[in-house]
Amino acid sequence: MIEQIQDLPPGALGFRAKGQVTAEDYERVIVPDVEAAFAITRKLRLLYHVGPEFTGFAPGAMWEDAMLGFRHFSGWDRVALVTDVPWLRAAALAMGFAVPAQFRVFRNDDYEVALSWMREPRAEPNNGNT
């Protein structure tokens, strides 16, 4: 199951994975929220918390996750994954270079740090002017 995390700043979405996560969870919860957010903004921040209540991904759920990322490949501003699941942390750290956004992996104990990172103002690009 996936539930939306409330009280994030404008331009940020958050989701929490609990129990078994299915492809239907993505289709029912994440995809509509992400598509609606991209309809009104060109850059989006994402916080994804896979906490201790998480038991696994059903077949097809990881595929839905990848497809969602590819549909909006250049639209991500920041992506934070909060989890202590060893294989998920390893995969995220190994593939983080491919995410076209600021990407960080946090431990469950650092959930509040991840929230703070989501709330930080966006750094303006330096165009050489001082």
Image (tube, rainbow, N blue to C red):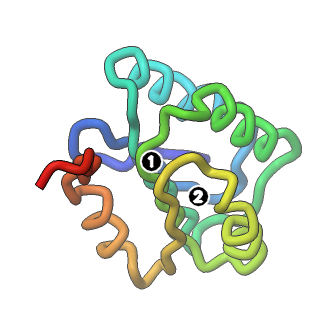
Would residue 90 appear left or right of 106 to someone viewing this image?
A: right
Label 2 sits on residue: 18
Whether residue 8 is visible, yes or no, is: no
Question: Which residue extends farthest top?
Answer: 39
Frontmost of labels 2 and 1 is 1
Label 2 neighbourhood size at 10 Å, few (<14), some (14-19), many (20+)?
some
Residue 106 is labelled as none
Which circle marks residue 46 in the picture? 1
Would you say 92 lies left or right of 6 here? right
Return the residue nearer the eye: 88 or 77: 77
Spot the residue most to the right.
59
Tell me what residue is drawn at x 65 percent, y 32 percent.
68
Residue 100, image x and y in percent? 57, 46
Residue nearer the viewer, 129 or 88 = 129
**Whole-Å distance between the Cαs marked 2 and 1?**
17 Å
Q: Is residue 118 above or below residue 67?
A: below
Residue 48 pos. (x, y %): 51, 55
Residue at the image point whose x is 69% and y is 33% from the top: 70
Lower position in the chain sequence, tag 2 or tag 1: 2
Check disc 1 and give the amino acid type. Leu
Residue most extreme to the bottom? 109
